Amino acid sequence: MAFAMVAMSLAAQDAATRPFTVRYIDENRLYQQYVVAQQYVELQNKLQNEFKQAEQKKRKEIETFYNQVQNKYQKNLYKTQKAFEADQKKLEQMQDKAQKEMETMQKSIESQLNTEQMKLANEIDIFLADYAIKNDLDAVLRKEAAMFINPRWDVTDEVAEGLNARYNAAHAPVAKGEPQVEGQAPADGGAAQEVASPEK
């Protein structure tokens, strides 16, 4: 019992005198280097472009019909007031429908991007926790959250390299006739090959 108490006391004393080890990452630079983050940016740009194209298409359809209505009205081609009002109502319905469809599309895009962003952030957090334990670190900070950190403690490149290595290992091709065992290097020597994320 006395020996255990002495051991605990020494351990506590060692923990109190051991230097507090901290490293940091530049999150912006990490996102530029990490392949999954690059895929996220590509997805973001793709979805935003699709939204703009859909929005432009809807706007063009509405403008075309509006011009047709105006042209018919100016040339007195409407035989009755009821026919003119019917086209006006149709124009309003087209506008309402387009607005609702674009709002739905926008929410879908935001939901998809939020899901992918959370997955990306979670992957990085898990890797950093493991990295800190393996390197006996007390903390890994984000540069953006600090006023100043000495550049000598920057481990961004090392973390990005580790993240990409893990990604490549998980997505490495498996040789035909030689099923890969989980945790085992592929038969081709672990050659890295980047592949796109599966479609959502």
Image: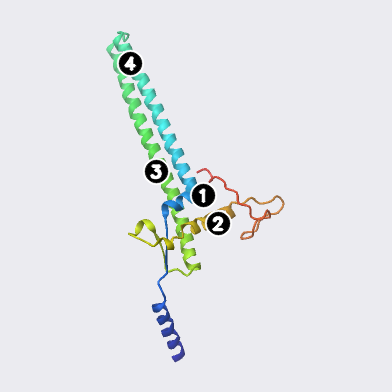
Give the amino acid type for the residue marked by disc 2 in the picture: Arg
Lower sequence index among marks 4 and 1? 1
Lower sequence index among marks 2 and 1? 1
How far, Cα to Cα, is label 4 from label 2?
60 Å
Nearer mark to the viewer, of 3 and 4: 3
Lower sequence index among marks 4 and 2? 4
The residue carrying mark 2 is 166
| Quarter-of-image position of residue 94 | top left
Nearer mark to the viewer, of 2 and 3: 2
Which mark, residue 69? 4
In the image, residue 138 lies at what x, y percent? 42, 69
In the image, residue 72 lies at what x, y percent? 33, 11
Nearer mark to the viewer, of 4 and 1: 1
In the image, residue 136 lies at what x, y percent? 47, 70
The residue carrying mark 1 is 35
Give the amino acid type for the residue marked by disc 4 in the picture: Val
Give the amino acid type for the residue marked by disc 3 in the picture: Glu
Give the amino acid type for the residue marked by disc 1 in the picture: Val
How far, Cα to Cα, is label 2 from label 1?
11 Å
Q: Mark 1 falls on what kind of element? A: helix
The residue carrying mark 3 is 110
How far, Cα to Cα, is label 4 from label 1?
51 Å
**Viewer-side residue, 111 vs 120:** 120
Is the Cβ of the residue at disc 3 closer than 8 Å to that at disc 4? no
Lower sequence index among marks 1 and 3? 1
Q: Is residue 1 visible?
A: no
Nearer mark to the viewer, of 4 and 2: 2
Instruction: List the single residue furthest toward the bottom.
Output: 2
Instruction: List the single residue furthest toward the right.
Output: 177
How far, Cα to Cα, is label 2 from label 3?
28 Å
